[in-house]
């Protein structure tokens, strides 16, 4: 996240919008894709318009910045697709923000968009494994469980991959147990090869 500055150094202003500070998050504030954590949501925040009238819009606060983010319907629907429609369930969740060029009112703007995927783990961090383990637990069919396995983040460490494999095998056994009395041993359940690490 780019920081607001009072610097007189031109290099501190990579985007023209940064010349005009705002209390609200805008595309120029992002430095590539940014992972942020939802801290609070204000459903009807009062905003002043340029014509001196006021309107109410939903705004989101993040732990990573003091700036508020005015959330449009497109982004709200994307977050709902990730974490469900209940706003209270979004608190504490992480989302990925990015910029996208959009045309509006005859001009092209750098709009903020929510990436339609949950943040994965950076190499060796383990955060994505915890998300995957939660995905394994809520899987209700073998197909959903296999899909959750295939969604594992790339580049996991061996301990993280081993944890995920054990959790997958245990959940697969649970899913198969009510259907029949098969006695297949845990060791024979194998989700297949882990996702390939990205090429260097």
Image (spheres, rainbow, N blue to C red):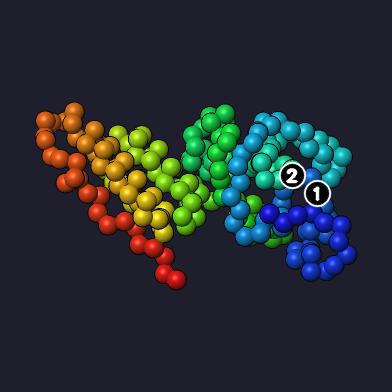
Q: Earlier in the sequence, mark 1 or mark 2?
A: 1
Q: Disc 1 designates what residue?
A: 22
For the point 58% across and 50% down, the residue is 35
What label does residue 67 carry, if any? 2
Name the spot of residue 194 as percent of width and height, x first: 31, 56
Please, is residue 133 above or below residue 119 in the view?
above
Dot 2 crowding, Cα within 10 Å, few <14, some 14–19, many 20+: some
Name the spot of residue 104 as percent of width and height, x first: 68, 54
For the point 29% across and 43% down, the residue is 166
Q: Residue 24: which quarter of the image?
A: top right
Quarter occupied by the N terminus:
bottom right
Marks 1, 2: nearer the viewer: 2
**Which residue occupies the extreme bottom position in the image?**
200
User: Relative to 5, is 36 on the left or the right?
Assistant: left
For the point 40% across and 55% down, the residue is 156
Q: Secondary structure at mark 1?
A: loop
Depth check, front residue: 37 or 169: 169
Please, is residue 86 above or below residue 30 in the view?
above
Total numbered labels placed on residues in the image? 2
Depth check, front residue: 110 or 169: 169
Measured Cα–Cα span from mark 1 to mark 2: 8 Å
Mark 1 and 2 residues: CB-CB less than 8 Å, in contact?
Answer: yes
The answer to whether residue 103 shows anywhere in this view is no
For the point 35% across and 35% down, the residue is 137
Depth check, front residue: 84 or 7: 7
Dot 1 crowding, Cα within 10 Å, few <14, some 14–19, many 20+: few
Quarter occupied by the C terminus:
bottom left
Name the spot of residue 165 as percent of width and height, x first: 30, 47
């Amino acid at each position: 996240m780019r920081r607001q500055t009072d610097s007189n150094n031109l290099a501190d202003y990579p985007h023209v919008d940064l010349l005009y500070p705002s209390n609200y998050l805008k595309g120029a504030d992002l430095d590539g894709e940014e992972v942020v954590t939802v801290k609070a949501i204000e459903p009807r925040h009062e905003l002043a318009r340029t014509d001196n009238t006021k309107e109410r819009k939903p705004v989101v606060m993040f732990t990573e910045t003091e700036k508020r983010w005015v959330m449009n319907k497109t982004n709200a629907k994307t977050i709902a697709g990730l974490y469900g429609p209940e706003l209270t369930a979004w608190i504490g969740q992480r989302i990925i923000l990015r910029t996208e060029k959009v045309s509006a009112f005859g001009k092209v703007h750098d709009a903020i968009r929510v990436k339609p995927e949950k943040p994965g783990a950076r190499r060796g961090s383990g955060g994505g494994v915890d998300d995957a383990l939660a995905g394994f637990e809520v899987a209700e069919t073998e197909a959903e469980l296999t899909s959750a396995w295939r969604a594992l983040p790339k580049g996991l460490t061996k301990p993280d991959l081993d944890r995920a494999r054990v959790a997958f095998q245990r959940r697969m056994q649970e899913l198969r147990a009510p259907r029949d009395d098969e006695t297949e041993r845990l060791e024979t359940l194998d989700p297949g090869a882990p996702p390939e690490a990205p090429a260097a």
